[in-house]
């Protein structure tokens, strides 16, 4: 991937597809816009689980599976999934126009512009399992049959996204959105199984030729996440960079594998006040002081991606676009810091 590339996490506040695509396509790595202002079906979890028998959601995107309706429709769902697996053809699991209005226009833009990289995002299996309620009471993660079906659906939809992007002629960068990992516990068997499913999904997508990232905008068991085999780890710098840097051994293995950090540098809480130069300086100080031995700021800093800390759906379209342009300012400041290091060492910054 291009060094110091800018991209977005996913959601935008626009209620028209064209300006949302324009904001996305202005980034170094364009990203698939999720537009929850158009429909609750475009919220993170509904977008991932549409098509599961018995599933529904409210305007806030809170999902519930009616287990009786799920049982009535599971035979057809299983047959559809098995047919896709047997044919190794996952097109039927691409998001619908209701769940992702920008999907088809985004694919067309990838082809028209000959984009070398394009990013999409999808809620991951742990967050989906934890975020979907059931009519029985427990969340879907704790209801074995429903949890398994949701895992297969997320797997199929992720494969469908990656296949379509590759067919459009680009290298897919797929972020699995896993904010639910802040609640992960090694003491919960269902949690441990979900993390194993997540690892298997990462490997499957990489076999398809995708670069696979994971986004978590809170603290979790970073050592286990770093060992998932990811290509990119996306985090909110203010919330999590220092905690991540404490995991010296797992972080060293992650970086040695060629994986990179995606730094959510620009805060996305509307009340935040900040200076971009100070944000970049704080990242430089943290990386300088706490990277694992043998991993210098000059090396790691030159390879990061830059994003907002999270999605931008809570902003106005104008403020969201201004925030995205601040990524370009942050990129320039980080390049200046790296260039100053290179000049001091008598080398050049490529």
Image: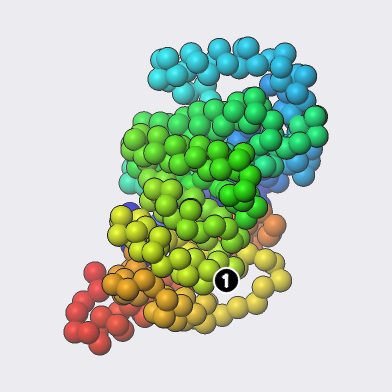
Residue sitting at x 48%, y 53%: 225
SS at circle 1: helix
* Corner quadrant of residue 334: bottom left
Dividing the image into 4 quarters, which one contains the C terminus?
bottom left
Residue 117 percent across, percent down from the top left: 37, 47
- Residue 43, given in percent of the width and then of the height, sits at 67, 43
Residue farthest toward the bottom in the current orientation of the protein: 344
Q: What residue lies at 62% left-to-right and 12% top-to-bottom?
A: 76
Left or right of 97 on screen, residue 254: left
Residue that sits furthest to the front in the current view: 187
Is residue 304 visible to the viewer in this orientation of the structure? Answer: no
**As displayed, is residue 8 above or below residue 281?**
above
Q: Residue at x 66, y 36 (%)?
A: 141
Number of dots carrying numbers: 1
Image quadrant assignment for residue 97: top right
The N terminus - image quarter: bottom left
Mark 1 Cα shell of 10 Å, populated few (<14), some (14-19), many (≥20): some
Q: Which is more toward the observer, 123 or 249?
A: 249
Residue 158 in percent (x, y) is at 49, 35
Here the colouring is rainbow
Picture layout, residue 281 above or below residue 205: below
Using the image as rendered, state which of residue 344 and residue 230 is in the foreground.
230
- Asked whether residue 186 is in view, the answer is yes
Residue topped by disc 1:
238
Image spot of residue 54 (x, y percent): 73, 23
């Amino acid at each position: 991937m291009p060094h110091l590339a800018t991209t977005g996490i996913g959601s935008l506040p626009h209620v028209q597809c064209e300006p949302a695509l324009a904001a996305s396509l202005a980034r170094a790595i364009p990203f698939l816009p999720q537009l929850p202002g158009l429909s609750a079906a475009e919220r993170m979890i509904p977008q991932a689980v549409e098509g599961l028998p018995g599933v529904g959601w409210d305007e806030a995107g809170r999902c519930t599976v009616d287990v009786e309706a799920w049982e009535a429709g599971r035979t057809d769902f299983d047959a559809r999934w098995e047919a896709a697996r047997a044919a190794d053809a996952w097109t039927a699991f691409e998001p619908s126009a209701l769940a992702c209005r920008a999907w088809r226009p985004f694919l067309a833009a990838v082809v028209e512009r000959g984009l070398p990289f394009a990013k999409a995002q999808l809620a991951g299996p742990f967050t989906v399992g934890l975020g979907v309620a059931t009519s029985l009471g427990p969340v879907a993660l704790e209801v074995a049959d429903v949890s398994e079906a949701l895992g297969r659906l997320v797997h199929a939809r992720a494969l469908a996204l990656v296949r379509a992007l590759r067919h459009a002629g680009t290298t897919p960068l797929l972020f699995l959105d896993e904010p639910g990992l802040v609640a992960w516990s090694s003491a919960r068997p269902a949690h441990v199984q979900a993390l194993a499913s997540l690892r298997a999904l990462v490997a499957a997508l990489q076999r398809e030729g995708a670069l696979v990232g994971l986004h978590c905008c809170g603290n979790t068991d970073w050592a286990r996440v770093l060992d998932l085999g990811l290509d990119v780890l996306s985090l909110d710098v203010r919330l999590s960079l220092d905690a991540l840097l404490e995991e010296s051994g797992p972080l060293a293995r992650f970086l040695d594998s060629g994986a990179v950090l995606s730094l959510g540098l620009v805060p996305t809480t509307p009340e935040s006040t900040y200076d971009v130069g100070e944000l970049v300086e704080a990242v430089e100080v943290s990386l300088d002081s706490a990277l694992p031995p043998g991993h210098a700021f000059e090396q790691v800093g030159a390879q990061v991606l830059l994003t907002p800390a999270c999605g931008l759906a809570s902003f106005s379209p104008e403020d969201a676009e201004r925030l995205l342009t601040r990524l370009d300012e942050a990129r320039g400041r980080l390049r200046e810091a790296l260039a100053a290091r290179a000049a001091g060492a008598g080398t050049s910054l490529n």
